[in-house]
Image (cartoon, rainbow, N blue to C red):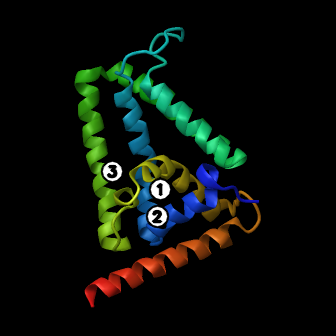
Amino acid sequence: MGRSGLLDLEKHFAFYGAYHSNPINIYIHMLFVWPIFFTSLVLLYFTPSLFNFLPSGYNLNFGFLFTLIYALFYVCLDKKSGSLAALLCFICWVGGSSLAGRLGFSLAWKVVLASQLFCWTGQFIGHGVFEKRAPALLDNLTQAFLMAPFFVLLEALQMYCGYEPYPGFHASVQAKIEADIKEWQDKKQKKSS
């Protein structure tokens, strides 16, 4: 049922999951990943418009392009949860554009900076104190940034609704996560001995 290459959801989820196996770290990421995405879109509101045909305040700029890429990628990974993630991405874009338009650049960048610092600090604490493993972004920056919002959504859907993109997904991913963590621990132990 799984796919291969860029659309291999199991591979992406297992990679990200291997860096987020501690329950407290997972909850920290659930709290902070989407606000990072949202505030990034607030800042990207101020990028030049690529096309100008939407109502005032909603520009097809880099924020929209960023949102569109994320949304399409998530839908390609899994139609159901990906569609929900895509909807959340567009809600963030509309909300971020609206907030940015009200704040103006001189205040918006300060709000974004404070929010980003707070959220990133929380996540690094989650990794350092609870996970005891460096963040995924240190090993694969693109995959970590691209998958983070979808990962925390899938994690929440699985935790609270028992959702799986297809039968056996969670068990297969969990086995890959455990194998990756064991490999990482073995390498860590070899370095220290």
Work out whether residue 112 or residue 149 is closer to the camera in this orientation and state it.
149
What residue did someone put label 1 on?
30
Q: Where is residue 63 in the image (x, y as percent from the top left)?
A: 44, 28
Badge 2 or badge 3: first in the primary sequence: 2
Mark 2 belongs to which amino acid? Ile
Q: Are marks 2 and 1 in contact (CB under 8 Å)?
A: yes
Assess disc 3: are there few (<14), some (14-19) or many (≥20) residues with their C-alpha within 10 Å of its C-alpha: many
Q: Which disc, if any, is residue 26?
A: 2
Residue 31 figure quarter = bottom left
Quadrant in the picture for the N terminus: bottom right
Give how far across and how far down residue 143 sits, in percent. Answer: 47, 52
- Residue 185 position, x and y percent, is 40, 82
Label 2 element class: helix
Give the structural element (helix, strand or loop) at label 1.
helix
Residue type for callout 3: Cys
Evaluate whether residue 11 shows in this view: yes
